Amino acid sequence: MDSSQTTTVRVGTSGFSFADWRGVFYPQQIDRGKMLDFYV
């Protein structure tokens, strides 16, 4: 019996354009349209 198993774990977020993330994750003055590019 083969006892090895593979598990895939995917991590991400349910959104990326949260205003509260400015100055914490995003630069303070980032344009909303640039948030996804920055997040990626």
Image: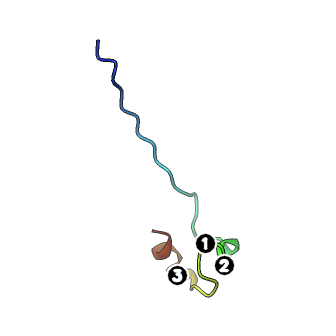
Q: Earlier in the sequence, mark 3 or mark 1?
A: 1
Residue corresponding to mark 3:
33
Q: Which mark is on residue 25?
A: 1
List x then y, in percent, for residue 37. Answer: 45, 75
List x then y, in percent, for residue 12. Answer: 52, 55
> Which is more foreground, mark 3 or mark 2?
2
Q: Earlier in the sequence, mark 3 or mark 2?
A: 2
Residue 29 in the figure: left or right of residue 40: right
Q: Residues within 10 Å of mark 3 (few under 14, many from 20)?
A: few
List x then y, in percent, for residue 24. Answer: 65, 73
Residue that lies at the very extreme toward the right in this rendered image: 20
For mark 1, give the secondary structure: loop
For mark 3, give the secondary structure: helix
Q: Residue at x 50, y 81 (%)?
A: 34
Q: Residue 20, relative to residue 29: is it above or below? A: above
What distance separates the C-alpha of mark 2 from that of mark 1? 6 Å
Q: Disc count in the image?
A: 3
Of the residues shown, which amino acid type is indicated by label 3? Gly
Residue corresponding to mark 2:
23
Of the residues shown, which amino acid type is indicated by label 2? Gly
List x then y, in percent, for residue 8. Answer: 41, 40
Q: Residues within 10 Å of mark 1 (few under 14, many from 20)?
A: few
Residue closer to the observer: 3 or 34: 3
Q: Residue 17, relative to residue 6: is it above or below? A: below
What distance separates the C-alpha of mark 3 from that of mark 1? 15 Å
For mark 2, give the secondary structure: loop
